[in-house]
Image: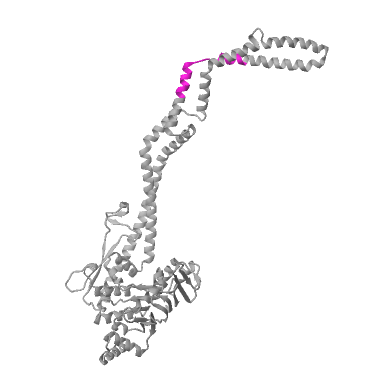
Amino acid sequence: MLRELRIKNFAVIDEVALELKPALNILTGETGAGKSIILNALGLIAGERGASDIIRNGEDEATVEALFDGLPAGIDSILSEAGFQVDDELVIKRVLSRSGKNRIYINGSLCPLAVLAAAGSALVHIYGQHEHHTLLQAETHLHLLDAFADVAAATKTMKERYGALTQVWNALREARESLEARRRERGLLEAQAEEIAQARLRAGEEEEMRADKEIMVHSEKLHQGCREGEELLYEGDAALVSGLSKYTVRLRELAIIDPNLKPTVDLLESSLAQLQEAAAQLRHYAERVHFDPRALEQVEDRLAEIQRLKRKYNAGVEDILRRHDEIKLSLEGLERGEEQIAGLEKTFAEARQVAWECAEKLSHERQRAAKKLTRDMEREVKALGMPETRFEVRFFTQDDKADEPPFFVAGKRLTDRGMDQVEFYFSPNPGEPVKPLAKIASGGELSRLMLGLKALVLTPGVVSTLLFDEVDAGIGGRVAEIVGKKLKQVAAHHQVISVTHLPQIAALADNHYVVQKAVEKGRTFTRVKQLSERERVAELARMLGGVKITEQTRKHAEELARGK
């Protein structure tokens, strides 16, 4: 429950300290006095975003601070998961700065907005003066039915199941698209694989071919040069081997005389052997190398084929060979891809079955709740001055024209909220058929229908404080009194803070506060004051009589005050 609210430099409010109490707290005051500004400040405490333009003119910062006690169930887990320690009291402070450095504190520790928003939804629920118009949007009806049915756990599970289904479907769709793309490329891949395989490329082959070509082109020169070398070393009249052999015999004889020449003899004999081997190799090379036009043509053709493949694939031989390996893997992957898709299709079918079972279970819970909501709403609106009203909750199948046909079963579309589409129908007049609420409800009827729904939907202990900003808009007279009594009924289980312009509602307040605006030294100031019993009568008389308050108006105000 909200115990204390402090607002500083917020719009026309310079500084306000408001002590609030349980049950029904009513805020009244002249139009433009700042009543809704107070609720806007509470919106910041509930986790709404704030802007610097709300800061009072001439000030650098605006602050809103709230003290809660008797905290609702679930708030402990929300804050403890975020690392905040919570006892019996909770202090929330928002600081808005013109510099843009806004800050949030929970029990004195800095807090991110997301955490405050989660906690704020459990602390404060704000019903704006135009919220009843959301009943004109059929998509909100399912939210209201779910809140009445108390299926939060089931809707959470449904969302998880749908998320898992969507994830599998996306994986299946991507796998199918990838496989289809590879299938379209199969012919090209197979042709490329065959072409590269038939080419029988080898790493380093091109360099070998170029070297062979160089030899073939110069074969005559090589042959002639080797023959010249053989002639010089072995075959000619003045061959080195012959002359050196003769001299070696002569030196061997001299070494007999002087053994010191023996090492020289050994060197000559070794050299002679090497020269003989060199002459033999030159002879063998000359016999092997010769100009062969056909062989040269074959080498040039092979080099031309290698160049063609290099240009075609815009890569070197090694890269073409790697490309060949990749193509073979891709072709092999086609078969594996079909197996993968079969597995994903099975997983998708299983996930869809689980999701649909969850959706069917949720739908059954909703349909049971819808029957009870119909009975309870007719009772509520009867108490709100519409005794002949008929109310229905109708279920529709989702439109089957959607982007994801696999999410349809038997004409029903699955979404993250299940398979149901809901719309409220009603008839305020006896003998008239029910029609879509969004098409025939008047403003006053919408206000009462929304209040009736909220009275049924709200669960004691879930949200501690409820804020109603002019829920009485568009009504008056006896209906206003009925609406006030319904607020009183809600306030039996929740702290209710409501802004109203109607004395019939204000008279039912357990705690009555007046918001007043004044101009002092050229500046506008807003003040909030809790009224005594006597002051309450005066405020009710003002609300009844306007500018001129007669004795009869005052007596009427006293009667209203006593009648609460």
Task: Specify the farthest residue to the left.
Answer: 431
Whether residue 289 appears in this view of the structure is no
Q: Residue at x 38, y 58 (%)?
A: 161
Residue 72 part of the magenta-drawn span: no
Task: Specify the farthest residue to the top.
Answer: 237
From what the image shows, is residue 197 above or below residue 335?
above
- What x and y, as percent, mark residue 454? 32, 73
Q: Nearer the viewer, residue 506 or 61?
A: 61
Q: Which residues are magenta?
A: 281-302
User: Which quadrant of the figure contains the N terminus?
Assistant: bottom left
Q: Nearer the viewer, residue 360 or 215?
A: 215
Q: Residue at x 26, y 86 (%)?
A: 545
Q: Would you identify the image quadrant in which residue 14 lies?
A: bottom left
Residue 295 part of the magenta-drawn span: yes
From what the image shows, is residue 517 above or below residue 216?
below
From what the image shows, is residue 560 above or below residue 142?
below
Q: Would you identify the image quadrant in which residue 313 lies?
A: top left
Judged left or right of residue 37, residue 236 is right
- What x and y, as percent, mark residue 135? 28, 69
From what the image shows, is residue 236 above or below residue 411?
above
- What x and y, as percent, mark residue 222? 56, 16
